[in-house]
Image: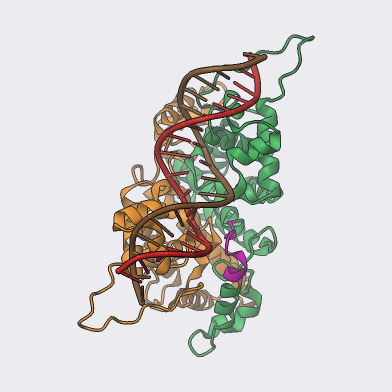
Chain colours: A orange, B green, C brown, D red
DNA sequence: ACCTGAACACCGTTCAAGT
DNA sequence: ACCTGAACACCGTTCAAGT
């Protein structure tokens, strides 16, 4: 994969000689443990210290292999988003939708990672230039005016990341229970007098709609809304891309 | 405004009698100081302890007026997003675009707040039921099938929040300088052999495109891309909403 | 080369005590 | 009613020291 992970990095430990003991800790083991920790617990408990506990070492041992917490985050993102770019296709609209779905599936496998992407520019460290190039190719194929390529590209990325990031937003950890109760109360308090259409749809929207839910996409997925969203975008893009 | 802020809350301090000294601290003063702190410094330095320093009190004094850090965040969001819902209009497409732009302008006034919204369900505490109702009204007016209202609503919110959240994503604080250098290097390393279209557009895309930038929307705004994005969505929505 | 261990400068929140 | 102050259980990271 053409994923260029940059960032200051100590010289990688050289291959151990055959007879020598493998070092207990490796960069790969650290990143794998980080993903496991993020998956199994809340994102809030992904700390260098908990990671060290998981690995059975002192927190400071990690720093010999990887320079910072941010570097770990970049590596995690790079891993999670591996292979989401579809093979080239003659149908650019389907290609884009497949890309969007692949991104969502990747996040769904590691929902707690979602808040790390899109909201922090650190994630840029995990650049996949190949994905960018193929998006530009597909847009060209779609008849996008050359001078509009950069802006169309940005709209594509926003569509890819935006919905899913929100769908898998973090549930508050500390006061989760009473917070959920509060949200339920708000939803239950909607009155037909002041908010007639909302009141009529509250059954369908309760805990399934943005701003009106107390669970995230891991427990209450939003497949239909996602499909409508990417459909609207791709359909609209076709209309305006060549003008 | 019909913003219902929920959450456990100690009984609000009663109005002081005229002759009595106003209490030094109020809920409003705390929230205002929080916004100022988030605006003036990085989001990372918005801590209860720094907030207390700003207010000239002990950290624990804050807890008498507001129950938690999350409650402050909810109040901040509620404040920042005040009055973004446009007045009703006969042109539903323009109404939606105005909503999206209002949201973006609100965030642009307080860019460091962006990561708090969309990525944390706490933000749901600042529900503006009036906004939701008006979105549903506008969608109905647009000819949206009733059974599709909830999904269309979700797509609208995703569009409103998604782009802007990414545009104003956080720049890494600690290693900011060397991180920016790393990003510049990646961008400079793009070769025409392997990535021809990207290489051709790198001038336009460098530091102005998602995944290829080292500054966020506060320093490098993305107005054109935003306009293309919301245009594509609204245009596409019109096509599929009634089918 | 790789890890331990102490240390620094931080966190959010609870709770008893003051006035 | 409102704030102080100590305390608890945490953070990421640096740096000297061990082996």
> In percent of the image, x 45 and y 38: which residue is there?
A172
**Residues in magenta?**
B169-180
Q: Residue furthest right?
A: B19
Image location of residue A56, percent across then percent down:
29, 57
Image location of residue A44, percent across then percent down:
42, 46
Q: Is residue A100 visible?
A: yes
The verdict on residue B176 being magenta is yes
Number of numbered labels in the structure image: 0
> In percent of the image, x 45 and y 30: which residue is there?
A179
The answer to whether D6 appears left or right of B32 in the picture is: left
> In percent of the image, x 52 and y 74: which residue is there?
A139
Q: Is residue A236 visible?
A: no
The image quadrant that residue B76 belongs to is top right
The image quadrant that residue B207 belongs to is bottom right
Front residue of B28/B92: it is: B28
The verdict on residue B12 being magenta is no
């Amino acid at each position: 994969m053409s994923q260029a992970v940059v960032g200051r990095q100590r010289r990688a430990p050289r291959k151990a000689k055959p007879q020598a003991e493998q070092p207990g800790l490796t960069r790969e083991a650290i990143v794998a443990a980080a993903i496991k920790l993020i998956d199994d617990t809340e994102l809030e408990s992904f700390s260098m210290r908990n990671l060290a506990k998981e690995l059975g070492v002192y927190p400071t041992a990690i720093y010999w292999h990887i320079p910072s917490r941010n570097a770990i985050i970049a590596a995690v993102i790079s891993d999670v988003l591996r292979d989401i770019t579809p093979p080239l296709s003659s149908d650019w609209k389907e290609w884009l939708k497949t890309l969007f779905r692949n991104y969502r599936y990747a996040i769904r496998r590691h929902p707690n990672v979602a808040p790390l992407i899109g909201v922090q520019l650190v994630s840029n460290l995990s650049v996949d230039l190949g994905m960018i190039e193929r998006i530009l190719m597909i847009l060209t194929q779609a008849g996008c005016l050359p001078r509009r390529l950069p802006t169309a590209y940005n709209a594509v990325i926003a569509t890819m990341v935006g919905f899913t990031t929100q769908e898998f937003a973090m549930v508050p950890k500390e006061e989760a229970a009473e917070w959920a109760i509060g949200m339920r109360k708000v939803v239950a308090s909607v009155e037909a007098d002041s908010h007639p259409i909302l009141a009529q749809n509250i059954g369908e929207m309760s805990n399934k709609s943005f701003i009106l839910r107390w669970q995230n996409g891991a427990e209450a997925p939003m497949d239909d809304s996602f499909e409508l969203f990417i459909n609207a975008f791709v359909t609209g893009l076709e209309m305006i891309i060549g003008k």
